[in-house]
Image (tube, rainbow, N blue to C red):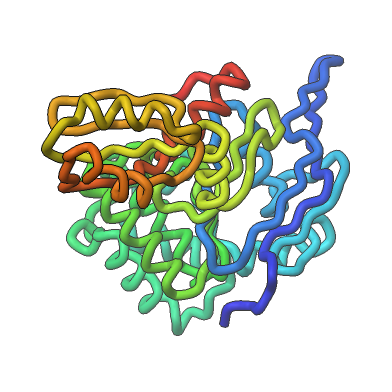
Amino acid sequence: MILSLDYVIETKELTKIYRSEGKEVLAVDHLNLNVEGSSILGLLGPNGAGKTTFIMMLTGLTLPTSGSAKVLGYDIVKESKEIRKKVGLLPEGFGFYDHLTAPQNLEYIAALNDIPKAERAKRIDEALSLVGLQDVKERKVGGFSRGIKQRLGIAQALLKNPELLIFDEPTIGLDPEGARAFKDLVIRLHKEGKTVILSTHLLFEVGPLCHSVVVMNRGRAIVQGKVKDLVEKLMAEEGYRIRFEGKGNLEAFAEGLRKLKEVKEVRLETNGISLIASGDISVQIGRLAPTYGVEVSTLRVEEPTLEDLFMKYYRKEGISIG
């Protein structure tokens, strides 16, 4: 049963400092974050941004240096055992016993997670089916490719039927078919009311699935929010890109559009006009076109993609995109 919580994750000034040989490394820097239930969150950023350390703190695998957090209503320090019962985690580089088959590995993991023996066979079979590994379940894991091992890692995260799933670099090693299947799985989990966190430096691989995003760099959240709100903010800051195709005196119409106070830039194209405006002037374009002898056949406002959105923040922070 899914808990009814406004936020499945709440962090307050969550900080992690690693100390080694007299040096300090600030891995997570006073992170404040609220994650809504039944949502898909993208935890994005380059390698070394602090994403994995953040996940380890959420699941009780490492203790915070300062600050606090709750996951599914449980304190990450005092109640980490309860959290691990309800969270499915795919850590990066998850390992299996090579001399065992996929079901045998999952049987061992199910036992460690106190899944009742009577339920294990059914859950293992369901998990293997969800990731498309039914046809290799008799083979030993040592003979699996990296992509198949990654699918098995996703399967083990599903065993507990968790309320929250956290996938760290989930599409690493997957071929296009496997990546597509994983995306379909995430959509299915969301429809079932589960919360999914996708941690990756491959923005363009899973970014389009996300309702909200947090971009991390050097342990800090440099931008966070709902994708829709962030896109609207970017359009307000950098302009609405509008493109239309049509017939008629496009040159005269382009000159007319340049005179509008909302229009920042106009570019004449072979079969139409593209422009940047301070707002959505689609209706205005439709009304003006006949006065210039132009018949508009198609018109669209081009919303920024996630690539457009985060290139701005990546460049600002000096981050290279992987």
Left or right: residue 185 versus residue 135 is right
> Would you say residue 143 is visible in this rendering?
no
Extreme-front residue of the structure: 291
Q: Nearer the viewer, residue 2 or 44?
A: 44
Q: Nearer the viewer, residue 116 or 201?
A: 201
Left or right: residue 161 versus residue 135 is right
Q: Quadrant of the C terminus?
A: top left
Q: Which quadrant holds residue 118? A: bottom left
Q: Please report the residue visible at 21 percent of the width from the left and 56 percent of the height from the top.
A: 136
Q: Please report the residue visible at 16 percent of the width from the left and 45 percent of the height from the top.
A: 295
Q: Which quadrant holds residue 80? A: bottom right
Q: Which quadrant holds residue 276? A: top left
Report x, y in % for residue 23: 82, 16
Q: Quadrant of the N terminus?
A: bottom right
Tell me if residue 103 comes above or below residue 69 in the rendering: below
Q: Please report the residue visible at 27 percent of the width from the left and 55 percent of the height from the top.
A: 181
How many numbered discs?
Answer: 0
Q: Nearer the viewer, residue 242 or 186?
A: 242
Tell me if residue 67 comes above or below residue 158 in the rendering: above
> Would you say residue 298 is visible in this rendering?
yes
Report x, y in % for residue 309: 49, 35
Report x, y in % for residue 272: 19, 33
Left or right: residue 108 versus residue 298 is right
Report x, y in % for residue 186: 40, 60
